[in-house]
Amino acid sequence: MSVGEEVQNTQATPQQSLGTAAARNLATTTKSAPQMQEITSRWLLRMLPWVQVQGGTYRVNRRLSYSVGDGRVTFVQTGDRVTVIPAELGELPALRDFGDEEVLAELARRCEQREIAAGQVIAASGESADRVFLLAHGKVEKVGTGPYGDEAVLGVHADGAYFGDHSLIEGDAVWEYTARAVTACTVLTLRRADVLNLAERADSLRAHLAGLLNIPHQRTNKYGEAEIDLSAGHVGEAVVPHTFVDYESAPREYELSVAQTVLKVHSRVADLYNQPMNQTEQQLRLTVEALRERQEHELINNREFGLLNNCDYDQRLQPHDGVPGPDDMDELLSRRRGSKLFLAHPRAIAAFGRECSRRGLVPESVEIGGHHVPAWRGVPIFPSNKIPVTDARTTSIICMRTGEAEQGVIGLQQTGIPDEIEPSLSVRFMGIDEQAIISYLVTAYYSAAVLVPDALGVLENVEVSRWR
């Protein structure tokens, strides 16, 4: 039999059973609910203690503190030329509250740019200090002498920091430590001689500097708070000091933020296509998931109340070797009592694991809600892909203490709102338009507050792509 005849006989054979394509029309297909890749574990939303906020605003009352210019300086880069924004010079303690824009602009023009190679000493301990250094880019470590004569790293400066600011008003200032570049750095320098020279011609600057010398010294504790006078250990009829606790006159208020969207469903779909799954319910479920994902992103990155932007500068640390190591995590823990959790990008957690493996350490794990979570010193390290990773492959690791009773970080919400389906999340029917489309307004209200500065710490500029 030829091949052609075989094919012809095969085609002529009658079908003896029902085909799968036809049978599927009568079968009930087993199907999943709609899936969504954007859904994550959202550990931050789960671990934050949420405080009920009536009236939509939460006020954080604190003891009065005296600020001494602890911010960072911002720069503008044009090609390889870097300049400081004049108003940012007001972050320097010597120029705090000085508002003459023309004089600040002149001081900014007098800043000289320098390129520092890695390993180069910028200022040596014991030498005369006659200028302030503004660090535009790079990393500088403060090196001192340990109790046994060995070298000790006292701290690390990174982008936007400044050092040597005391030299602007102290004629006999000396460097109390050695400043050494860890990486290639771009710095701007402002000499005391230039400031004094300009003060001879600018009355506003001369009066400002003279006023600094006449300001009485305000006694404060190590946190910058007005000191409470106490007497202890005395005998006899010693005079007991009088005191009071002063509060901030303009405490910070956190207003609840909002995330909203309008969900639209055609009435024909809502009426006819509801078996075995309700179409409106599934549309709403996925919308709420996306809204909660955005809520967690805002709690971390929002410029007004996000954790990364509201961490006090004294609580921002730099890794000693770029990669996140056990020493860095210990330093982060040592800055606060009762740390409840770390929050890190999964790539940062992997980088920390590699560093532990390199040192022969095995991080422990703790069980949280039936999940085994990696931990360091008993503090769980929760993953969050909402923490950004920059183009330079660096990210941040957050450490926090939580709860109102612990003066920690808290989440803010208002429950009991109209048409609420989840705490502080509502779905409101908006009506049906002329095209028979049903609209629902989906709204979530939320915010976060840091009750005291040391409740929140951040390890910045963590490298996640170095393998060694």
Image: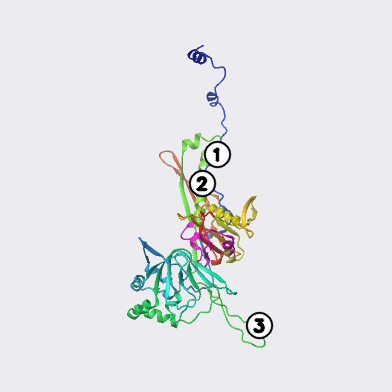
> Which structural element holds mark 2?
loop
- Mark nearest the camera among 1 and 3 is 3
Q: Which residue is mark 2?
A: 38
> Which structural element holds mark 1?
loop
- Give above or below for 318 relative to 63: above
Count the marks. 3
Q: Which residues are magenta?
A: 301-330
Q: Are marks 2 and 3 in contact (CB under 8 Å)?
A: no
Residue under the image location 38 percent in, 73 percent down:
99
The reply, left or right, for residue 195 in relation to residue 120 is left
Q: Which residue is mark 3?
A: 233
Residue under the image location 61 percent in, 66 percent down:
337
Looking at the figure, which quarter contains the C terminus? Answer: bottom right
- Give above or below for 25 relative to 339: above
* Identity, as a three-letter code, of the amino acid under mark 2: Glu
Q: Quadrant of residue 111?
A: bottom left
Q: Which residue is mark 1?
A: 33
